[in-house]
Image (tube, coloured by chain):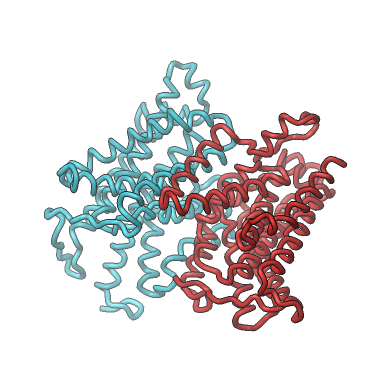
Amino acid sequence: MTARIVAFAAVVALGIAAPFLGLYPVLLMKLLCFALFACAFNLLIGFVGLLSFGHAMFFGSAAYAAGYGMKVWGLTPELGLLFGTAVAAALGLVVGLLAIRRQGIYFAMITMALAQMVYFVALQAPFTGGEDGLQGVPRGALLGVLPLQSDLTLYYLILGIVVAAWLLIARIVHSPFGQILKAIRENEPRTISLGYDTDRFKLLAFVLSAALAGLAGALKALVLGFATLSDVYWGTSGSVILMSLVGGIGTLSGPVVGAFVITGLENVLADRVGSWVTVVLGVIFVLSVLLFRQGLVGTLRHFLPGASRRRTGAPA
Amino acid sequence: MEIFGRPLPALASQIVLGLVNGSFYAMLSLGLAIIFGTLNIVNFAHGAFYMVGAFGAFFALSDLGLNYWVALVAVPLAVGAIGVVVERGLLKQLRGLDPLYGLLLTFGLSLVLEGILRDFYGSSGRSYPRPPALNGAWNLGFMALPVSRAWVIGVSLAVCLATWFVIERTRLGAYLRAATENPSLTQAFGVNVPLLVTLTFGFGVALAALAGVLAASAVQITPLMGSNIIIVVFAVVVIGGMGSILGAIVTGLGLGIVEGLTRVYYPEASATVVFVIMAIVLLVRPAGLFGKA
């Protein structure tokens, strides 16, 4: 336990020092947003065993909602973020109610289809800017007093929010509620026979995951100042799956590692290989599924002392 | 004559166009259902194979000088062979694992195929010249039916019904159904189940490629056409349920018609209507129209 706290403190310290190590703050903020997005996605696949193939709809709709609120209604950043998160949670409630009526592979197909529907709505709706997206979202001033124009100020705000959200996820996973989720992942019929209304637990987990994915999307809109169709596109749903898979599904730190690796890789490759980025990501996808299903963190755990105690998660 | 304020010829031509799209849905969901039944894998790359089929027809014509009629046979065979290699080389490793891994692997595979074709042909894609024999239209009295559209619908119906016949009414189909039900027992009776599984996957992929060749002369060929259609086909499969072959065919064609009608009466919703129907079906009959609970 103490080792974990030391590791956590070291990572947070690294996060605080990162802008002074020559790393570009906007890139760091983007990495943090995707890390939170991947953690939110992993809450479902890793701890309830539900594969959502449409998480971009929460990420993207929150990005649009927060961006629209801050740009058109002049909301302050904290209200914009809250509004985006609330929109994603409401969408998560509707989608969750539909999707948990089917299980396993159908759940994945339903979430993907509904996400595509959200994509078409975003393409046609008057308030999203269509193909151009929603541009020029102002950063504003936090609570109306602290201006966020400086990248460094915004970076520390984002870092604080993402760390807090990560701690919330860790708390959820280790709570009695989280234990019931894991029981559903391992054996749903048995959990039902123990008297749990598993549909309600799955729905609550789905809404939580959608809201956190929405928070990530809203943060992204605040950082980069725009929300575009690619935020709601199925490709984004695919990348967040890849991030969790590469990092380690069912681990708390895996999605963070995976998000950094994949987003970093996309950044590095985009300049060098152009359209082959998709091919490289596809190959990583195939290889991860074939050879590397536990991900970086999951594999690392095998070589650490006490590995036998902890279970390495796999989708159920 | 008008029906609900729309002239009959316009309505009829949108229904025919809907049937063309529905033919592709039917062929793709049929292949998905057969593959899911035998391999327990939802093949996301099915859309990519459809796209490869369309580009294959284009490549055959422009680089190899093979005309449409040759491509109609050769391209599905070639893409089906790729499918056989994919099954033997990759999907076989996933036997016994959760079917979600199969979905993820085939998703990665479709990213690879899409990326490669985008590099060769660009995002805007190509268009395939319609073979002269398919030009013109038949006058049905109330509408002019373009020969090319009737051709697509006719071929896909014939292929779908032939597939149904082979699976439900022949000895080979009986082996296949037995292998779906209980692979180890079927193997014990002397049926080469792994070979059957591989060939089934190859056949499903060839079916997708055939749909792609048919689509080549009907729509613009782009690298993204596969992923865009496969997501709609997933909704079709959720609506129809993967248990029944005739169910897949009927649902595919039916949703194509619904899409066509939506394009006439409320064009803004034509891209989303299938997803809305999926949501309604999930509320009313969660197992799907032809599914068993």
| Residue at point 30%, 55% (across, down) | B221
Residue A196 can be seen in this image: no
Residue B76 appears in which quarter of the rendering? top left
Q: Between B121 and B274, which is closer to the camera in this rendering?
A: B121
Say if B262 sits above or below A206 in the image.
Answer: below
According to the rendering, which colour does chain A have? red
**Place of residue B1 in the rendered image (x, y in percent of width and height, measured from the top left):** 25, 78
| Residue at point 66%, 66% (across, down) | A219
Say if B231 sits above or below B292 in the image.
Answer: below
Residue A262 can be seen in this image: yes
**Place of residue B26 in the rendered image (x, y in percent of width and height, measured from the top left):** 37, 50
Number of marks: 0
Q: Residue furthest bottom?
A: A73
| Residue at point 55%, 54% (across, down) | A237
Q: Between B96 and A83, which is closer to the camera in this rendering?
A: A83
Q: Between A211 and B266, which is closer to the camera in this rendering?
A: A211
Residue B124 appears in which quarter of the rendering? bottom left
Say if A1 sits above or below B179 in the image.
Answer: below
**Place of residue A106 in the rendered image (x, y in percent of width and height, measured from the top left):** 56, 48
| Location of the N terminus of chain A (image quadrant) | top right
| Location of the C terminus of chain A (image quadrant) | top right
| Residue at point 34%, 57% (across, down) | B21
According to the rendering, which colour does chain B have? cyan
Left or right of B4: which side holds A272? right
Q: Residue furthest right?
A: A2
**Place of residue A311 in the rendered image (x, y in percent of width and height, measured from the top left):** 75, 34
